[in-house]
Image (tube, rainbow, N blue to C red):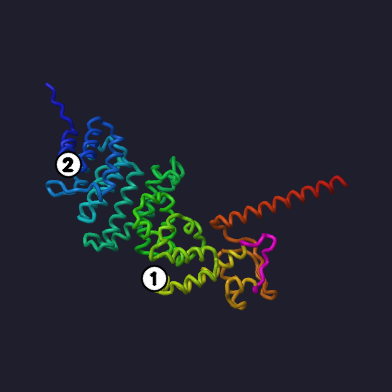
Amino acid sequence: MSTFTDPTAAAQEHCEAMANQAPDLAEQYQSIASLLQRKLYHQLTVAVLEFVSAPDRTLRTTPDGTSSYLALYDRVVLSVDKRLNQLTLARIASAVADATAPADGDAARAVLVDLLAAKRDRLGPSAALYVESKLALLGLGLLRRGAPSVDGPKHLAATKELLRKNEAVLTEQAVGGAGGAGDAESDIAVVHSAHYECAMVYRKAVGPPEAYYREAVQYLHYTPLDALPADEQLALATDLSMAALTGDGVYNFGEVVQHPLLRCLVGTAHAWLVELMEASAAGDVAAFKAVSTKHAAEIAAQPALTGRAQMVQEKITLLAMVHMIFERPSSERTLRFADIARRIEMAEDQVELVVMRALSLGLIRGSMDQVDGTVEVTWVMPRVLDAAQLSDLAGRFGEWAVKVSQTKEYMSEQAFVA
C-alpha cells in the first residue's frame, strides 16, 4: 500500500480556492496550479513573477484576511522553492514584500528577512545580494513614510555598509558573468539594478547630490525605462535633473539630456527643467539666462537650486567655455580673453579667474598668458556628444583625413624629386 503524499497538493488546493473566490483571476490561478502539477518550474516562476508584479490588478485578500500575495508565496512558491531559479525566487519574494509594505511593513520585511535567514546558502551570491538590496530599499521606503519600526540612523548606517560591501561582488559579476546592461533581463542587469536603486534612494536620503547623480545614472544603465511606472519616471527625471545641475563636479550630463527619461517631463509642471538642462549641457549662457528669467517663480520654489545658485551659475559659465574650446579646431586652441568674455557673458577682467577654475577642476589643460590675455588649451574634458556635435566631429575627421592625404602626396613627390 503506497503512502506517497503529494507535497504540492495543498498548494494546488489553495490555487483552486482562490480561483473560486476571485473569478476574474481564475485563469491565472488555474494556470499556476497546472504548471505546479506538471512540474514545469521555469514556467511556474515566470507566471508567478508576472502575477505578483501587478498588484493593482491581481492583489486580493484571502478569506482569513491576509494578503493573497503572501498566501501564494507561503503556500505555493515555498512548497517548491528548492526547484526554482533562486534569483527568480528572490524577485518573487521582493515583489510580494513591496505589495505588502503599504499595509504591513513588518510583514513585508519578514518575507525577505526569513528568505535570507533560512535559504542564504542556497540562494547563492547574486540572489542573496539582490534580496539584501531590496530589503535595505524596503527599509528606506518605510523610513521615508515614518514607520516607527525602522530605526533611522541604524538603518542608514547599515545600508551604507551594505552598499560598500556589495561593490566588490558586483565588480566580480560584471567581469566574469554573461550578459550585461544591454540585456535588461540578464542576471547581472537584474542584480545591478537592485543594488543601484538602493544606492540611489540612500543617496537621495543622505546626499550629496553628485553621489545621487552617479548612482542614478548607473541605475538607468541597468534598468529598462518601461519597467518603471509613470510616476516613478517623473520623480526620477526631476531628481536626476536637479542633481546634475547642483552636483559638485558634475559637468558632463549629456547622457542624461539625451536619455528618453527626460522626455517624460515635457508637458508637465517641470517641463522647464528640460530647457534648463539642455541650455546647461550646451553651455548656452544666453539660453540659460532666458529660461531662468522665464521660470523664475518655479526655480525659486526649488530649495535644491536656490541653495546652490552660485554653484549652478559657475557650472554654466565653465561649460560655456568648455564648449567654446571644443567647437574650435585643434590647431586653433589659443583663445583670447576678450573672446571668452563674450561667450560666457562676463567682464574680461573676470576671465582669468574662470580659466584658473577650469584648470584646477581638470576640465581643461593648458597654459595661460596673463600679459597677452590668452589661454592655450592642449586638452578638453571628454563628454557625451549630441547628434550635431557628432556631425561636426565627423566633418573634422574628414578634413584631417584630407590633410593627411595631401601631406602624404607632398612627401612622396619630394622623395621622387630627391
Nearer to me, 212 or 45: 45
| Quarter-of-image position of residue 163 | bottom left
Q: Residues within 10 Å of mark 2 (few under 14, many from 20)?
A: many
Residue at the spot 61% in from the left edge and 65% down from the top edge: 324
Counting residues from the start of the chain, the first of labels 2 and 1 encountered is: 2
Amino acid beneath label 2: Met
| Quarter of the figure with the N terminus | top left
**Does the stretch in magenta take in 328?**
yes
Nearer to me, 59 or 290: 290
Residue 264 shows in the view: yes
| Residue picked out by circle 1 | 302
Amino acid beneath label 1: Gln
Q: How far is disc 2 from disc 1 in space, using C-alphas?
A: 48 Å
Could you say which disc has been placed on residue 323 in the image? none
* Residue range (magenta): 326-338
Circle 1: element type: loop
Q: Is residue 403 above or below residue 39?
A: below
Which x, y percent locates residue 8? 19, 34
Q: For this view, does 311 lie left or right of residue 104?
A: right
